[in-house]
Image (cartoon, rainbow, N blue to C red):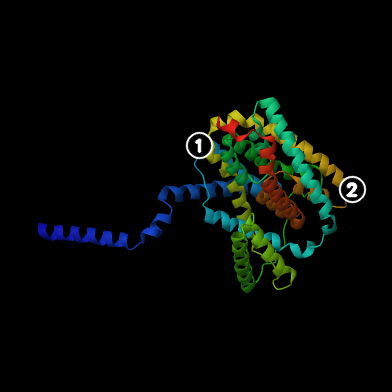
Amino acid sequence: MPHGRGAFVACSRICHKARVNMIPTSLAQHLPSRSETLRVAETIAIGTAGGLLFLWANLPGGLISGAMIAVGGAALCGRQLLLPPVMTQTVLLLLGISLGSLVSRQLIQHVSEYPLTIGLLALATFCSTFGSSLYLQRFHGWDQTSALLAGSPGALSQITVLAAEKGADVAGIAVVQTIRVIILTAALPLVLVVAGVAPSAPTILSAEVASPIGLAALIAASIAVALLLRLAKFPASWMFGAMLASSLLHGAGLVEGGLPSWMRNVALVGIGALIGSRFARMRLKTLRAHVNAGLGSFAVAIAVSSVFVAVLVLMTNVRFSDIVVAFAPGAMDAMLALALTLHIDPIFVGAHHLSRFVFVSIATPGIVHLFGRPQDDVDD
């Protein structure tokens, strides 16, 4: 009997090893661990709860703002929240498809105004960067390089890489940039509602859902175009690729209707959770040390942008809400998500945020080289 029991145990161990070895090593290395899976599930649960709470309260941009504030608050309380890259890409793809489904009605709206508005946006970005930089240097004692990079609106990933190369204050720059995005995403819908240029309740988008074949065509075309843009190193390729594919299919009349409402809602909650999860990478001590710098820098950037918004309102026929969201110095994905929820022209907003992204990515290294501290000083 003992011999039989020993044979059974040995057989069990062999079977267990066989089951483990059936999973290829390369695949096993890419599978998320149990702790990572729980962190992702917690992020989704907290973001969904926050979004639904704000939606229940009829707050504008409720799904985005609620998810962002809930996840950001939990992250500041010490929860290590995250969204994996594949989930982030899926959220951006869904957002792009939803934006593209609105394009057929607004494709040529305000196109004649683009050269003027984009030109003023470039000037506003330049003035905002130097205004915020001067504030950080004069009132918070930042060095020139760190101040210029923190004052540059958008393109956070490129700014962070450049900051590391130049020996700048990466943590401080990340805090200032993140605070700006958080405030804009949470406050901008409320500001537009108070100004009477956006609905006080969540906008009900077209309920028409594309046919199964249409949905399959939308998703397949969006993935294909997004991958092509990604190969070409195009910024925000997943979102803009899906938006371009969806726009072409809808504009040509090949597809009628868009994603089911629950898919759009998933994308909006996902964007909010993604922004809020940035705080999980920050220490509370670091945040407290730079929060005043972030708030002051944000105030300067908004003041500068407001001047250019006022000029455009007087000079053009573009809607005030479209100009405000297009000129808001926030993250491209967050601003386009707000455009979707507030029924703002996604083409106008997307063109301007893409233009600023390109301008910042190209001009910032040159600005830092000309006006920042020399590399030798940084290294010392």
Instruction: Tell me which corner region of the image, top left, top right, bottom left or bottom right, holds residue 244.
Output: bottom right
Helix, strand or loop status at disc 2: helix
Height in image: 144 above or below 356? above
**Residue furthest right in the image:** 314
Give the residue drawn at x 80%, y 49%: 119
Instruction: Tell me which corner region of the image, top left, top right, bottom left or bottom right, holds residue 351.
Output: bottom right
Q: For the N terminus, which image quadrant?
A: bottom left
For label 1, the residue is 78
Which of 132 and 274 lies nearest the eye of the viewer?
A: 132
Which of 54 and 263 lies nearest the eye of the viewer?
A: 263
Height in image: 137 above or below 18? above
Quote the CA–CA distance across marks 2 and 1: 48 Å
Helix, strand or loop status at disc 1: loop
| Relative image position of residue 210 (x, y in whole percent) | 66, 69
For label 2, the residue is 315
Q: Amino acid at mark 2?
A: Met
Q: For the C terminus, which image quadrant?
A: top right
Which of 265 and 366 lies nearest the eye of the viewer?
A: 366
User: Which label number is shown at residue 355?
Assistant: none
Give the residue drawn at x 58%, y 43%: 161
| Relative image position of residue 87 (x, y in whole percent) | 54, 55
Q: Amino acid at mark 1?
A: Gly
Which of 140 and 42 lies nearest the eye of the viewer?
A: 140
Q: Residues within 10 Å of mark 2 (few under 14, many from 20)?
A: few
Give the residue drawn at x 41%, y 51%: 33
